[in-house]
Image (spheres, helix red, strand yellow):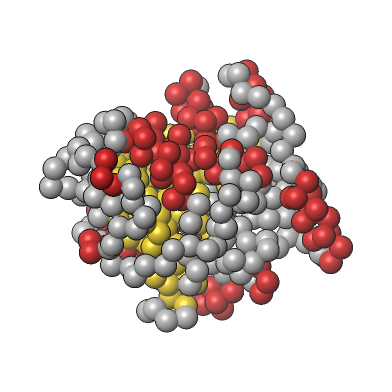
Amino acid sequence: MYNRRKFIKISAAGASLAALSNSALAKTVSLKPDTNLPIVISTWDFGIYANKEAWKTLEKGGRALDAIEAGARVPEELDITNGTVGRTGTPDRDGHVTLDSCIMDEFGNCGSVAAMENIAHPISVARMVMERTPHVMLVGEGATQFAVEQGMKKEKLLTPKAEKAWKEWLKTAKYSPVMNVENGSNRPGGKYNHDTIGMLAIDAKGNISGGCTTSGMAFKMHGRVGDSPIIGAGLYVDNEVGGATSTGVGEEVIRNVGSFLVVELMRQGMSPEDACKEAVHRIIKKKPETAKQIQVGFLAINKKGEYGAYAIQSGFSFAVCDAKQQDLLIPGKSYYPAGK
Ligand code: ASP
């Protein structure tokens, strides 16, 4: 068990980052000499644990897609302290845990599930949609039905802890959609903070894949779908250029087709961090007053394995594990309060 918010703070700055607590490093072989590949990066501090699992595939020379699925399953399954992904996700305002997820590979194939109930591993179902159906996206009961047909276990997902939090929320809630649960006591680190794991990996062959999984905005309207299962919004991968993923208020990411935008900006020559920054600035520019109150963060990687992130508010972090360094947790730069 670990506290998601007590992360190791290290200064942000690409290549010169110091490796932390790295017993595994000595064993790590650079599968692509002179580069930091393979590499996996993930949003937030629980990304460290997802990366560790993904790394087991990458260090053997395995495919980035397999690494992503294995990594994303960690917070979906094992992290009983997180209330935002998979089995331990927070319910919607009616008490249903509805999960959103998507995955994308190096060929541009993608799969997605949205508002899916009773299945703990949406990332795996998203992959099944990609590989076993002619479709990209399945939602709601159809997604659950498909998952069960594919052999996934149907189970109740509302944990006692999440149920308690929901009942507490009901006492004071106006039972109206909450656009921004990161306000006030719900700011990053707050009780009802909502986060997503977005993951991007490049394998030893240089191929890129990504995945994204979440229970979405806490106490959202029943049926609400965020950015996380939307290809182009919560995740986008182009094997020629790089990949991007997002976390935060999904509505703003969808409105700006955020992850696709970040990849396209990298295609035009921007660094991953600058591309994320520009995408954040577009959101702020369109709605400056709203932006003061919400969190959106982007994380990106380019084909060379360079990575970067940028968020509207401080508090966003991302985890990195590559052939040179492991267990890194990096505070993402932000527009508020300091950055520009
Ligand atoms: N982006 C997710 C959503 O809007 C939630 C989050 O990342 O905090 O559903």
Q: Depth check: 40 or 283 in front?
A: 40
Locate residue 283, reporting x and y percent. 47, 68
Identify the residue at image location x=63%, y=51%.
Answer: 81
Relative to residue 34, is residue 265 depicted above or below? below
Locate residue 204, reporting x and y percent. 23, 36
- Which residue occupies the extreme bottom position in the image? 338
- Which residue occupies the extreme right position in the image? 171
Question: Which quadrant of the figure shows ligand 1?
Answer: bottom right
Q: Is residue 262 visible?
A: no
Q: Depth check: 14 or 7 in front?
A: 7
Identify the residue at image location x=68%, y=55%.
Answer: 218
Identify the residue at image location x=74%, y=43%.
Answer: 159
Left/right placement of residue 135 relative to residue 176 reads: left
Locate residue 34, reporting x and y percent. 12, 47
Q: Which image quarter holds the C terminus?
A: bottom left
Left/right placement of residue 11 relative to residue 127 reads: left
Q: Depth check: 52 or 215 in front?
A: 52
Locate residue 151, reporting x and y percent. 60, 18
Relative to residue 83, is residue 154 depicted above or below? above
Examine the image and state in which quarter residue 278 appears.
bottom left
Q: Depth check: 106 or 330 in front?
A: 330
Relative to residue 157, is residue 219 depicted above or below? below
Q: How many marks?
A: 0
Q: Is residue 273 visible?
A: yes
Left/right placement of residue 175 relative to residue 41 reads: right
Identify the residue at image location x=73%, y=60%.
Answer: 177
